[in-house]
Amino acid sequence: MSPEEFEQLRLDLIYRRGTSYNKLIKNYRDSCLSALVNKGCALELAEDLFQDAFMKFTDKVIDNTFTYRHEGGVKGYLVKRMELDFYSNMKKQKRRSDIRKDIDIPLAYITDKETEKLHQALWKAIDQMQGKNCSKIFRMVICGKMKLAEIAKLLGYSSGDAVTERKRACKKELTLKALDIYESLM
């Protein structure tokens, strides 16, 4: 793309003419997608990321905040934007995965601010739990370090296995609540 073609693209975008827009998508879509897929991104996600990056690019072109230097700069911008969004997405998913794993870690192992926020979120979520005896079960296990058979006796369950089943069902609710609370703290 020459500087003249880039200026034509900018004008087409401003006046909502599709000629240059469609040409740009045709020229860069496949190469941008393959660049991200080669880095481990699923094709469907790469397509979403391309659309997002392309919209950001067109906004910059319309606002005249994108400086055209050479033809590779357009593809470079799109791929870099897609990569940043992809890695940001992966980081969020990893953090959610880490939270799910952390639910079983005792509170005595708080080592950094993020873990501290996680535990704040867990305790807040435990306090807000609606399920039958969920809050009580978690408090007895975590704080009281009680055995499941003792908890069963105190709460009227038939056995420790029944408490385990109840705890498993409550853990799903706890995980979702804790994730929501954790994200609001970040």
Image (cartoon, helix red, strand yellow):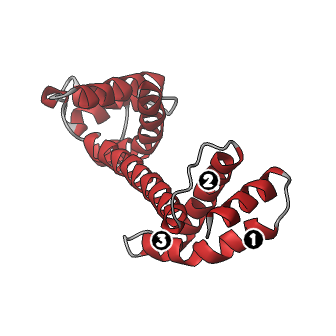
Say what amino acid the circle numbered 3 marks.
Answer: Ala
| Mark 3, secondary structure of its residue | loop
In the rendered structure, find residue 22 and report the number of the disc placed on it: 1
**Do the CB atoms of the residues marked 3 and 1 lie less than 8 Å apart?**
no
Q: Which residue is mark 2?
A: 57
Tell me if I can see residue 183 in this picture. yes
| Mark 1, secondary structure of its residue | helix
Say what amino acid the circle numbered 1 marks.
Answer: Asn
Q: Between marks 2 and 3, how big is the CA–CA gap? A: 22 Å
Q: Between marks 1 and 2, how big is the CA–CA gap? A: 14 Å
Earlier sequence position, callout 2 versus callout 3: 3
On the rendered image, what quadrant is the C terminus found in?
Answer: top left
Q: Which residue is mark 3?
A: 42
In the rendered image, the residue lying farthest to the front is: 4
Q: Between marks 3 and 1, how big is the CA–CA gap? A: 24 Å
Residue in view at x 51 percent, y 57 percent: 69
Earlier sequence position, callout 3 versus callout 1: 1
Residue in view at x 23 percent, y 32 percent: 150
Q: Is residue 37 left or right of residue 160?
A: right
In the rendered structure, find residue 175 and report the number of the disc placed on it: none
As rendered, which of 103 and 141 lies closer to the eye? 103
Mark 2 Cα shell of 10 Å, populated few (<14), some (14-19), many (≥20): some
Residue 20 rendering spot, x and y as whole percentages: 75, 67
